[in-house]
Amino acid sequence: MSFEYAPAPESRAVVSIKPKYGHFIGGKFVAGSKHFPTINPATEEVLSQIALAGKAEVDAAVKAARKAYVGTWSKMSGKERGKYLYRIARIMQERAREFAVLETLDNGKPIRESRDTDIPLAAAHFFYHAGWADKLEYAGLGTSPKPLGVAGQIIPWNFPLLMLAWKVAPALAAGNTVVLKPAESTSLTALLFAEVCQQAELPAGVVNIVTGDGSTGALIVNHPGIDKIAFTGSTEVGKIIARAVAPTKKSVTLELGGKAANIVFDDAPIDETVEGIVNGIFFNQGHVCCAGSRLLLQENVAEEVLHKLKNRMEKIRVGDPMDKNTDVGAINSKEQLAKITELAAAGDAEGAERWSPACNLPAKGFWFAPTIFTGVTQAHRIAREEIFGPVLSVLTFRTPQEAIEKANNTPFGLSAGIWSEKGSRTLWASQQLRAGVIWANTFNKFDPTSPFGGYKESGWGREGGRHGLSAYLKGVSHE
Ligand code: NAI
Ligand code: MG
């Protein structure tokens, strides 16, 4: 028997979106010169016009950040800085509903995820780092740790506010000031965060937000007035940034792509594992750098797992992100949809077998049904390249050693998952996997206290936890 869900739409009345936005520089909103539209990817409705920062605006933001660093923030005691961070965290909690609705409208992710994951975790990052601000001397990072100065921070569109929190909270806790650029398709929650900074009476210039595209990002990366670059996004752009900062004195952290193996051993608890596989690849439409996008099944349980996985996938609700029952929302952009479609077509062409449950996709907006490919080999593009969408590539293995070899056979190394009831096997496997984060009998668990980052082409440095703090302090190595 199956139950029909009645629609349960979240109200958008809680947000007021302006027709046009400027930049947030030196504590004030300043008008932009050029603008571009930001849309709701679930409906293609234009939500607002976002300003495109050029050289003059980036210069002004860096100047404001330097002034605030020299004049105020670097002189302030950690205890005082912490007060501001606590204030920001509390205001984010108070305005959580507004943030969640805005994030869902601008990004396309289900309201259930923005409400229960993105926004609470973003606030948690500020609370966590607020606690560090007056205890840096005791973090095991030297007796008198010093900030780096002005940090240029460039973030992606998959977790817009959360990635802002990952970057801004540790930078401020450690005594740096920031110039942050959100991704071009998801600027609205960063601009609402700017309002929160005003509400918290954060000293002018400590946080500056300039909006724009890759050209604005490049202006930040190449700006001589910046001491540190923190970037999350594609490996391609990460390499451009690494080359640009190599001949300079800038510090850099890069959080890039992934192609994580989610390994299922034959002693795994199958029902729980199926939930973990679904969460691993269909959470946030698969727009997750650490997504479990390569499922490695031990051969003798492969058939059973796939059968149960397909049954479970039949129950995934794809559609209106504002509906509280929705599991999978809209693909973030037309460009991303084109990329997913192209890679899935390559899966067909190279001989893998595609399966999706029946689902009615809305006529307008950008959608991709949850999809699995079986019969995938390691040579297939869908086993090697990051799809960044709701597409799972399934491979099989016979022995545990073969699982490790296949899992590590990738240029990436961000995350991995292990499903087994046996602790010794889990420990054995996790010691051999070349991945920064390894989950055992769970997947996609995030916590501000836990460092996150990758090996190889997945990036440099760590964010979160004590390790993440070190990336915003002088003279502390961060690997
Ligand atoms: P992207 O790397 O181009 O964009 C990420 C951010 O970098 C945005 O704010 C963008 O404006 C900025 N940017 C772009 N070019 C830049 C440059 N030359 N210098 C400085 N900043 C620059 O990512 P895109 O094009 O949106 O997505 C392409 C693919 O990248 C995705 O399909 C996915 O595979 C991967 N990706 C990975 C992410 C992750 O969390 N690791 C996040 C976003 C994308
Ligand atoms: Mg791009």
Image (spheres, rainbow, N blue to C red):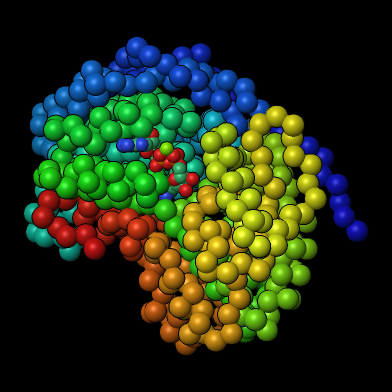
Which residue is more in the foreground, 88 or 167? 167
The reply to whether residue 137 is visible in this rendering is yes
Query: Can residue 204 be spotted in the picture?
Result: no
Q: Ligand 2: give its quadrant.
A: top left
Could you tell me residue 262's position as x and y percent? 54, 69
Q: How many marks?
A: 0
In the rendered image, the quadrant that contains the C terminus is: bottom left
Tell me the quarter of the image containing the N terminus.
bottom right
x 58%, y 69%: residue? 377
- The answer to whether residue 136 is left or right of residue 109 is left
Q: Residue at x 82, y 44 (%)?
A: 5
Q: Position of residue 234 (x, y in %)?
A: 40, 46
Task: Name the spot of residue 341 as percent of width and height, x first.
Answer: 62, 45
Image quarter of residue 224: top left
Q: Tell me the quarter of the picture where residue 205 sits.
A: top left
Q: Is residue 423 left or right of residue 323?
A: left
Q: Is residue 7 left or right of residue 326?
A: right
Residue 90 location in percent, x, y? 41, 38
Whether residue 246 sits left or right of residue 40 in the image: it is left
Instruction: Please name the residue shown 65% across and 78% down the image.
Output: 269
Determine the residue positioned at 34% across, 12% down: 33
146 vs 392: above or below: above
